[in-house]
Image (tube, grey):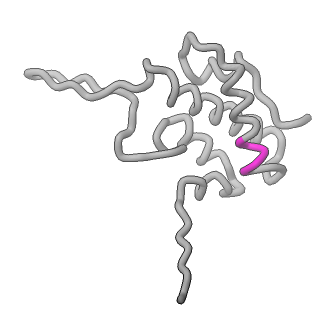
Amino acid sequence: MAVSTTPEKVQAVIDTDLDVTPFITTATAFYDTRVGSALPDEIGSEVLTYLAAHFVAVTDPREKTESVATGSWTLEGKASANETGLHSTQHGQMAVALDTSGRLRDVDKRKARFTVL
């Protein structure tokens, strides 16, 4: 079995009206580049499902809600203003948590380069 997911699996973890097929294609390319064969196929397929859902979440306007406070009630949305990259959605966070190889954990970290003159 190869690492794969289906539209049905992605839609089971994120409620969306969007066609998730392009997001699965993007997630697959991202997974292949970043994780490759570092995980068993079963867990890799779960990671791939959550990566696709992450890409849906950052695109679907319904997922980008904000907090609104009026009087005695507060409505809070799903967007995370304090995080970027995979950590900006619950689905990206789940993909990172499931990745026991640790390769997705450092994706959002920037590398510094110093040149000594």
Up the image or down, 105 lies above or below 6; here it is: below
Which residue is found at the position 76% from the left and 48% from the top? 33
Q: Left or right: 23 with respect to 87? A: right
Q: In this view, does 102 lie to the left or right of 76?
A: right
Residue 113 or residue 43, whichever sits in front: 113
Task: Tell me: 69 left or right of 42.
Answer: left
Seen as rendered, the residue at the extreme right is: 1
Question: Where 19 falls versus 91 (above or below)?
Answer: above
* Residue drawn at 60 percent across, 54 percent down: 107
Where residue 11 appears, as percent x and y from the top left, is: 63, 18
Residue sitting nearer the eye, 78 or 33: 33
Residue 108, above or below 75: below
Q: Is residue 33 magenta?
A: yes
Where in the figure is residue 117, as x and y percent of width and height? 53, 89
In percent of the image, x 59 and y 58: which residue is there?
A: 106
Which residues are drawn in magenta?
30-34
- Judging depth in this view, the residue of 15 and 65 nearest the camera is 65
Q: How many discs mark residues in the rendered view?
A: 0
Q: Where is residue 71 in the image (x, y as percent from the top left)?
A: 8, 21
On screen, residue 102 versus residue 4, left or right, reads left
Tell me, yes or no, whether the highlighted magenta stretch contains residue 112: no
Residue at image point 26% right, 28% down:
67
Q: Residue lying at the far top in this picture: please name it.
A: 17
Q: Main SS of the magenta segment?
A: helix
Which x, y percent locates residue 82? Answer: 36, 46
Q: Which residue lies furthest to the front in this view?
A: 117
**For residue 10, what is the image quadrant?**
top right
Image quadrant where one finds the N terminus: top right
Q: Which residue lies furthest to the left in this view?
A: 71
